Image: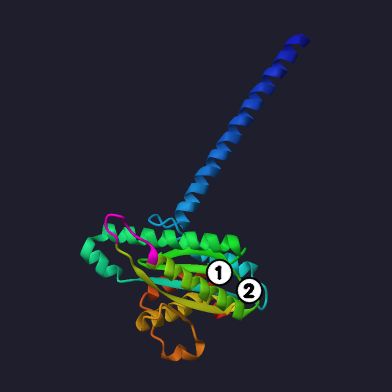
Amino acid sequence: MSGLVTVGALFLCLVLALQLLSARRARRALERRLAVADRAAHTDPLTGLANRAGLHRALDRQRATSRPGDHVAMILMDLDGLKETNDLYGHDFGDSVLVAAAKQIQETVTRRTHDEAGLAACAARLGGDEFVVLLGADVNSGVAAEDAEALADELCAGIASAEVMAEMPIRCTASAGVAVLPAHRMHQLITAADKAMYRAKSTRSGTSRYQPLNDVSERIPRHRTALVALEGGAFQKEAQA
């Protein structure tokens, strides 16, 4: 009788162990699916950079980790003449231009982040031919501005030197706007960087830095819809506080 009880107990332990193993496998599979879904929700499918949702999450994270007195920098870039390229060669080639530009941005940001820990917090495609690089916080606004402007110049130079396709050696250029603001005004970063980028594009200066004193004379950003989407939620609440 005791032998049957022992066998029954062992069998029950085996069943429980198999159920536990199955539950663990199911949990790991679910975690993988959730990770894939999360990446898809925050990644631009064409370029592999963060999308607007990914940038918004990076901004939330940056705001949560910033200290009093920190300054945050952002670079907003716009490719020059992409519409004409699309009209001349087609949208598939235009997509190749975007992919080549994104590759240059990612390689440059990765290299600079490796050399200078914490320099870049996020590289994203805002939409269309516009790209954003969010930099890590720095208590010194002058240092933050110097780092951002140096990176913007390097990014523009890299994009200008990138060959899109070997069989069609066409290159593109980019205009960049740099904005540096206190962390508590982070919700205004995209608008400020956009104004600086527009100035760089209109003056063909390559890179321009946002100057608050000139804000009254600046235009309203032409892609206000995208900016409002990014500056909503927590950032909008912060601005109203």
Q: Is residue 71 above or below residue 21?
A: below
Quick one: which residue is furthest to the right in this view? 2
Instruction: Please state the total of marks drawn on the protein image.
Output: 2
Between residue 68 and residue 167, name the one nearer to us.
167
Of helix, strand and loop, which one carries label 2? loop
Q: Residue at x 39, y 62 (%)?
A: 101
For this view, does 126 lie left or right of residue 95? Answer: right
Residue ID for mark 1: 135
Q: Which residues are magenta?
A: 161-169
Q: Residue at x 63, y 74 (%)?
A: 138
Which of the 4 image quadrants contains residue 158?
bottom left
Of helix, strand and loop, which one carries label 1? strand
Between residue 109 and residue 219, name the one nearer to us.
109
Check whether the beta carbons of the residues at disc 2 and disc 1 lie within 8 A of each other. yes
Residue 144 belongs to magenta span: no
Residue 163 belongs to magenta span: yes
Amino acid type, callout 2? Asp
Task: Give the numbered dot on residue 138.
Answer: 2
Q: Main secondary structure of the magenta part?
A: loop
Q: Is residue 41 above or below residue 230?
A: above
Quarter the C terminus occupies = bottom right
Residue 236 is at least partly visible in this image: no
Between residue 145 and residue 54, name the one nearer to us.
145
Dot 2 alpha-carbon crowd within 10 angstroms: few under 14, some 14 to 19, many 20 or more: many
